[in-house]
Amino acid sequence: MTMSDTSEASSLSVRPERSETRRQVMARAIRAPGVLPAATFVLILLVWEASCRVFAIPSFILPAPTRVLGGFGAVDTARWLEHVWATLRVAMTGYFLSIAISLPLSIMLSRSEILSRAIYPILVVIQATPVVAIAPVIIVALGSGDLPRVVITCLITFFPLVVSTTTGLMATPPELIELSRSLRAPVFREITQIRLPYAVPYLFSALKISITLAIIGAVVAEFVAAEKGLGYYIQFSTSMFQVQQAWAGLIVLVLLSLILFQIVTAIQRFWFPWSLPGDRT
């Protein structure tokens, strides 16, 4: 075998190893957290931009992403922060109010079958009633301040918290309850040290859902009656056919919901890591 044959054979043996290495690198990159969602999002933006340009879609119907970016400059930073704070203030107030009401109520529902039969159908009726339909009535009854908007937000976020927390409290193994009662443990210790730890995964599932519903509730209330907030800004922009500004407000709303969702997830991961899927022993 000549030297040229030897070098050719060695190069052929190296090429598959290099190609295999590239495949492994690409596979690891694809499996990296956030890579696929980010790539998909970029692809959607490219298709959106290309469709608007190729089909000449009017900007007042569907603005291209580049025009949406221009909508952010239509309002100064101070005004954006004012709208964001108005929506965030109402959303978080209604959110924490629903938590303060739902936790004690869930404990009472899990402790009393009679109370559960009496109150649960009423909760279902409240949830089945479209909040958008009763929002004007709430505004008329409570005025045009933050109070009616907080009530609307609380009504939207309330039901998932009650149902999920009650389910978690009832999911406690009965043998643990019998053991605590045989040891004559107080009811307070039974709730705080046995039932609530088992309800934490259910509770955080509801908290994640409700934090996004809180933003929806605040926006719905701002659609009905408000002078500030992202919902008001979107409604005002669309009424003036400034659709790119309305899309900009919508993007801010989505980012705000995602940030709040990640905050709740981080709280669960930091304080209750055992309650995450696959981590509970």
Image (cartoon, grey):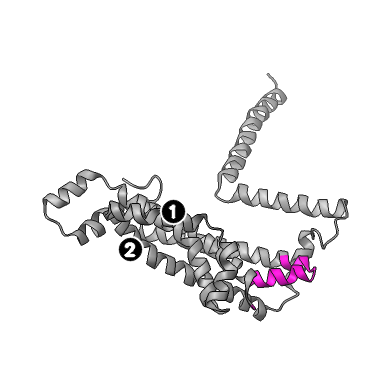
State the predominant SS element of the stretch in magenta.
Answer: helix
Between marks 1 and 2, how big is the CA–CA gap?
18 Å
The C terminus appears in which quarter of the rendering? top left
Total labels: the figure holds: 2
Pick whichever, 172 or 259, lies toward us.
172
Q: Is residue 186 above or below residue 139?
A: above
Pick whichever, 262 or 150, lies toward us.
150
Pick whichever, 71 or 41, lies toward us.
71
Mark 1: give few (<14), some (14-19) or many (20+) Cα within 10 Å. Answer: some
Q: Which of the 4 image quadrants contains residue 207?
A: bottom left
The disc at residue 104 is: 2
Mark 2: give few (<14), some (14-19) or many (20+) Cα within 10 Å. Answer: some
The N terminus appears in which quarter of the rendering? top right
Residue at the location (20% across, 49% down)? 177
Q: Position of residue 47 (x, y in %)?
A: 77, 49
Tell me the amino acid under the disc marked 1: Ser
- Provide the residue designation for mark 1: 205
Please tell me whether mark 1 sits on a helix, a strand or a loop: helix
Please tell me whether mark 2 sits on a helix, a strand or a loop: helix
Range of magenta residues: 227-246
Tell me the amino acid under the disc marked 2: Pro
Q: Which of the 4 image quadrants contains residue 278?
A: top left
Pick whichever, 41 or 187, lies toward us.
187
Q: Which of the 4 image quadrants contains residue 8?
A: top right
Does residue 195 appear to the left or right of 73 in the view shown? left
Work out which residue is located at the far left of the displayed protein and give it: 183
Q: Position of residue 125 (x, y in %)?
A: 47, 55
